[in-house]
Image (cartoon, helix red, strand yellow):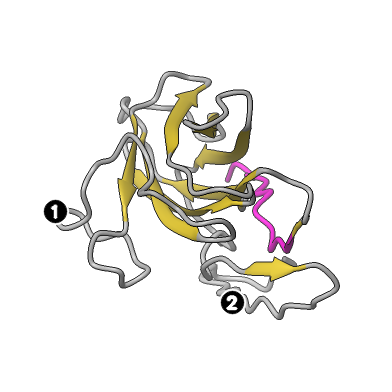
Amino acid sequence: STAIQDDAKDEITVVSAFASVVVTPDNSGLFAPGGTTSYAHYVVNRTSSFDTFDLYVASALSWPTTIYADTNGDGIYDPGVDLQVANTALLAPGAAQLIFVVTTDPAPGSASGTRDVAQITAVSRVSPLLFGAATDTTTVVSNEVHDLSGGGTRLVSQNTDAVYPGTILNDQAANDRF
């Protein structure tokens, strides 16, 4: 059996009052060769004016990546319901919009351990020198042992704690440490 190291982690993001555009959180996850996964991000307008942000995504391995808006507002990526977007809606100062980045491994024969990092960037239309970014790290696993990449996201203000639940299931035939 080949050991796969998963660097998925719970993350608490502190949103600085001085940042102009925030894309949060950074994500990591797993999928089987040829798989697809979605990652949730918030784009936060920390400027002092109403603004729309153009959205870009670049995959290090050139994997297909697409950005969707949470069209029905349920907080969950819904294929066939949520619409592909190239920008946010017009956001008031301090407002946020939930987006999803969907990543697909284009090669069903990808080797276990293959890792892609996608950079998600939101650029202000009012002041194009203002931008925010986040990353999604996706690892291909042939035999998925555990996955701590789920659980949703938390937007946390300064000096505030957040509890981030997680679950580990040992579906192997023997005891193991996680």
> Viewed as shown, does residue 124 lie left or right of 75?
right
Is residue 29 found inside the magenta-colored segment of the image?
A: no
How crowded is the residue under tag 2: few (<14 C-alpha within 10 Å), some, or many (20+)?
Answer: few
* Residue type at numbered disc 1: Gly
Seen at 31% across and 52% down, the residue is: 69
> Viewed as shown, does residue 83 lie left or right of 119?
left
In which quadrant will I find the C terminus? bottom right
**Which residue occupies the extreme right position in the image?**
159
Q: Quadrant for residue 172, please give it.
A: bottom right
Residue 167 is labelled as 2
Please name whichever residue, 127 or 137, is drawn nearer the observer in this view of the structure.
Answer: 127
How crowded is the residue under tag 1: few (<14 C-alpha within 10 Å), some, or many (20+)?
Answer: few
* Residue type at numbered disc 2: Thr
Q: In this view, does 148 lie above or below 169?
A: above
> Viewed as shown, does residue 96 lie left or right of 131?
left
- Provide the residue span drawn in magenta: 1-14
Residue 12 is labelled as none
Residue 80 is labelled as 1
The mark nearer the N terminus, 1 or 2, is 1
CB atoms at circles 1 and 2 under 8 Å apart?
no
Q: Quadrant for residue 13, please give it.
A: bottom right
Image coordinates for residue 99, horizontal then vertical, percent: 40, 52
Seen at 34% across and 66% down, the residue is: 76
Seen at 59% across and 60% down, the residue is: 94
Please name whichever residue, 110 or 173, is drawn nearer the observer in this view of the structure.
Answer: 110
